[in-house]
Amino acid sequence: MELKLQNPSPNSEIPQKPTSNSALKDLSIFERASIGAGAGGSAGAFTYVCLYPLETVKTKLQTKGASQIYANTLDAIVKTFQSKGILGFYSGVSAALVGSTFSSAVYFATCEFGKSFLSKFDSFPPVLIPPTAGLMGNVVSSAIMVPKELITQRMQAGAKGRSWEVVVRILEKDGILGLYAGYSATLLRNLPSGVLSYASFEWLKAAVLRKSEKGKMTPLESVCCGALAGVISATLTTPLDVVKTRLMTQVHGEAVTKVAAATLGGVSATVKQIMMDEGWIGFTRGMGPRIVHSACFSAIGYFAFETARLAIMEQYLKHKDQQAKEMMAAASS
């Protein structure tokens, strides 16, 4: 079945198999969300590990004072390698792996739930389903993503010790709220970024499927659509990402306190400080590696998600078909 923007039913994304399509119609919203969670978790873990070095370089370039330490992206890479070797690019990877797996599972589960739920309302504009689902996914997953990114970015910025030691220090100094420093800034970045990325991918996918008249995209099509969606999102939201990174990587006791960091006042103070210290150029720090990272992340991530989702869906439908046959055989005997 062809996926059209005017009718973004989740059913249309499944390969053409009579038994699968028949069984698919019987899947509940929660079954779709569970499949999305499994695919999202595996895709998130795989993607974060592959692209973690780029995230590390981006964080180093966006940290306060980076303009005095690193001349450019290449300089940041060279200095990181010289000081810590290849492992320097993977500081905090354990926290990122656990956090990204969980947050990606929650994100895609919520997005799949949102798509399935909203598509049941005829009065809801179909073109708004992807961005609305993306918005829902980001609001829910940010509650998990913020502590993960906070720990990860502090380690990338040079914090000593293992992930759990960084967590202990944060709790000792700032309490549980310390894990949510930069939460408002994260939402300000993640909501537009997530909506732009997810909606762009869904719209691009719909256009590709409408043109090709197939039930699913080829791997190359998934990669290209994902990469373009990532570029669009990263380019437009880098200033918000700079503000979020500054809030998360500040040291305890600086002018912007943990209380201010958890409010819009903290965001406002950080914006003013960046303007005062660096001007408008300060809001573009790390844009190059962030665009590359986002393009690669979205390309690999959406490809991995689509591949995993269809594989899990196919196995789940086969399992349900087998169960139905066994029940029919038992009833007839």
Image (cartoon, rainbow, N blue to C red):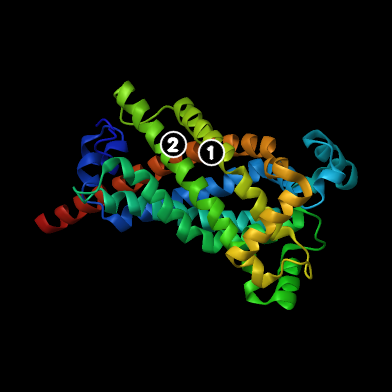
The residue wearing badge 1 is 298
Q: Nearer the viewer, residue 19 or 69?
A: 69
The vertical placement of 230 against 39, above or below, is above
The residue wearing badge 2 is 201
Q: Which of the marked residues, 1 or 2, is nearer the chain's N terminus? A: 2
Please report the residue visible at 78 percent of the width from the left and 50 percent of the height from the top. 277
Q: Nearer the viewer, residue 306 or 180?
A: 180
Circle 1 sits in a helix, a strand or a loop, which is it? helix
Please report the residue visible at 64 percent of the width from the left and 46 percent of the height from the top. 49
Circle 2 sits in a helix, a strand or a loop, which is it? helix
- Image coords of residue 149 (percent x, y): 64, 57
The vertical placement of 211 against 129, above or below, is above
Query: Does the CB distance between marks 1 and 2 fall below 8 Å?
Result: yes
Q: Nearer the viewer, residue 312 or 253?
A: 253
Residue kind at label 2, given as amino acid type:
Phe
Q: Quadrant of residue 7?
A: top left
The vertical placement of 42 against 95, above or below, is above
